[in-house]
Image (cartoon, rainbow, N blue to C red):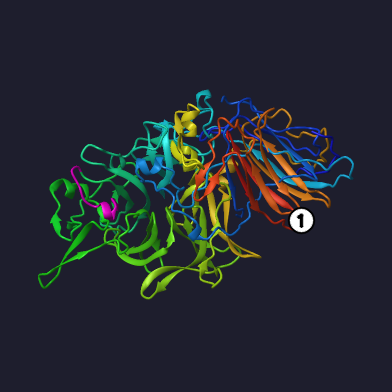
Amino acid sequence: MKKENNTKANLIKSMAVPASAMMVLSGASAVILANDDVNLAPVIEEPAPVESVITDGPIGEPVESSAEITVSEETETYNSQESEAPAAAEEEIPAEDGQSEDQQKEETPDEAGQTPDVTPEPAPVTVPDAAAPAPETTVQKTETTAAAAPAANAKAETPAVDKEQEEEAYREQYHFSNEKGWSNDPNGMVYYNGEWHLFFQYYPDGVNHGSMNWGHATSKDLVHWTEHEIPEVFKASTDHGMRFHFSGSAVVDKDNTSGFFKDGQGGLVAVWTLAGMPEGASWGGDFGFQRQCIAYSTDGYNWVAPDLGIERVVLNSDGTTRQLNDKEKDFFKNVVLAEGSLRTVIHNADGTTTLVNEDPLTNGDFRDPKVFWHKESSQWMMAVAGGPLRFYSSKDLIHWNPEAMQDDIITECPELYYLPVEGTDEYKYVLSEGGRWYQIGDFKEVDGVWTFVPDTMNGPTGDVPLRLNMNYAPDAYAAQSFYKEDGRVVMVQWMSNWSYADNSTIRQPDGSKVTLEGIRKMLGEKHNGQFTLMADLSVVRTPEGLRLKQTPVAEYDQMKNLEVKDDIVLDDKSNPLEGIHSQQFQFEIEFAPEKGTEKVVLEVLKNKDYQTTIWYDVNTGILHVDRSKSMAAEQAPADHMQNGTWFKFLQDYTAPVAMTNGKIKLKVFVDNYSVEVYAG
């Protein structure tokens, strides 16, 4: 690197710690420099895939690595400010949780809103050319933190990770990840009796997508997790037909509205998508094979699938009906909302019967129910999609009435957050479209049905809802929040991407097809699944309007074990974290670039061949997380078509981030081979 002029910076806080057990990364330490002549980027011996997530701010073998910050006229920054998402009409529907194996292996678009996890490598902050006077950049509030050892869990069965293990070179340490097998969407998230319960799409017998179960893990603090056996109710089965368990949610039925619990007591109720058909079934093709079912629990570990006694008949393709046989009755015994091929029988007082279609849209993409208590109408609400968005209401969690059928919104994993607007007494509804995009608005009765109504419309005729990016890199998807009665909304996402997580068949520009092996299988890992940081959600008012704010939960602060408080002036010899090595750390820094500074650059997970760079372009206000050099090109997932555009793993991801009072504040979380950057 060429010699650069010195730049002054004030370092207020700096922290670095070895990581706890939840995701995989190799060691990285943090160093703050003001001179391009000194390289303090993390050092890694092996090329590593970097899964990165850029968040709208308020919105090999494990080895050592360090972090470097340099200031220069060519400083690069990675921005996580909010920006408008592309219009829905330009997006294809991503493959759902329960897509068939053939569908998933074929070059299908990503799941709606899916953002691949990207772990940026350390990015150097460069200084201007020596020929020019060196602009000063003030660095304020710099924190680097790594995860501490996991705490013991009273109900520990199989700790997810007790310590870094050499055979888990790519497993996250202070994020949650399953110990073995495949995982994707988070499910059934609920806080109950002092524990956070996290369920997730899970296939324990291989690192590729398979028969979907619900994995289960618990935590006392959102940081240290213990994995448990798959509850019997949520186990996949092919013994008497195909019975797979797709995404869903869980709530605390404290008032026993369902009637499942003893008088005066409540418990947990889960509602999720049961996919598949009973043995010998030959119907339902035109109506799909997804429906919503229910189970209950008094402790979160042991679950019961009740026989609801709801009478249904099969609707044949020719319009005739037939009764269910005993196997079919057992298969559908706990279904609360059936697909179009099953009609609910209502016996009227006059002796006639009515057949009810519980999906008014009669669309086979009918999954991912998210249930929440709606205080205004004193009843339960459910958002369900997989394709078009529907809303339902219920007094007892069993019998559901259709509300708005909003088929202009196409998404997977829908959720409606009720969030406070910071600094006010106001609350707003935020519609999450799979964690990829969001809309801000209201949830109110329109023409007699409860409907999500966006606040802002744009487009040539003013009739297109304003959709905003929830994240800016491609490795965060299927967002879900924990159901917690005190109103706290904690969200987490699957940190991966269908483009490289599973084996896939892609079409080349010449029309030929090539099968690509999933990246974890290619790397020889025994696990394939990790989740983003847990984040508290709120809404903030910005010059552009209301925006979603994501803040890593304060519980991660417990992992800090080093703090540097003294103000220092950075030069080519400054290294406040010299001798500290960890590949799991938090880093909080605030830059105040002086006039003439063009870039602020941080390098992470760096060795002589590879690095990830986080940099801010002062002139354009664009934040970059550049993973184009994060691993060997021959090991990286191949470029291929995704949602109408060519997806590249090794590329630079960007987001607009405006300076506030002439400053840029970043929170960087590095965990083995993942990087998450929060800005603003």
Residue occupying the far left of the picture: 351
Residue 284 on the magenta span: yes
Give the answer, above or below, for where 492 lies relative to 254.
above
Residue occupying the far front of the picture: 510
**Image point (24%, 46%), residue name:** 277
Residue 41, horizontal then vertical, whole percent: 70, 33
- Residue corresponding to mark 1: 662
Give the answer, above or below, for where 636 lies relative to 475.
above
Q: Say which of 92 and 291 sits in front.
A: 92
**Image point (59%, 32%), residue name:** 633
Residue 494 on the magenta span: no
Q: Residues within 10 Å of mark 1 (few under 14, many from 20)?
A: few
Determine whether, in the image, residue 178 is placed left or right of residue 552: left
Look at the image and tell me in which quarter the C terminus lies: bottom right
Residue 289, horizontal then vertical, whole percent: 28, 50
Determine whether, in the image, residue 540 is placed left or right of residue 211: right
What amino acid type is highlighted by mark number 1? Gly
Residue 554, horizontal then vertical, whole percent: 57, 47
Question: In what element is the residue under mark 1?
Answer: loop
Can residue 510 be seen in this snapshot?
A: yes
Q: Which residues are magenta?
A: 279-291
- Which corner quadrant of the image does residue 581 belong to? top right
Determine whether, in the image, residue 57 is placed left or right of residue 93: right
Can residue 372 be seen in this snapshot?
A: no
**Image point (67%, 54%), residue name:** 657
- Which corner quadrant of the image does residue 542 belong to? bottom right
**Image point (65%, 46%), residue name:** 667
Residue 107, horizontal then vertical, whole percent: 44, 43
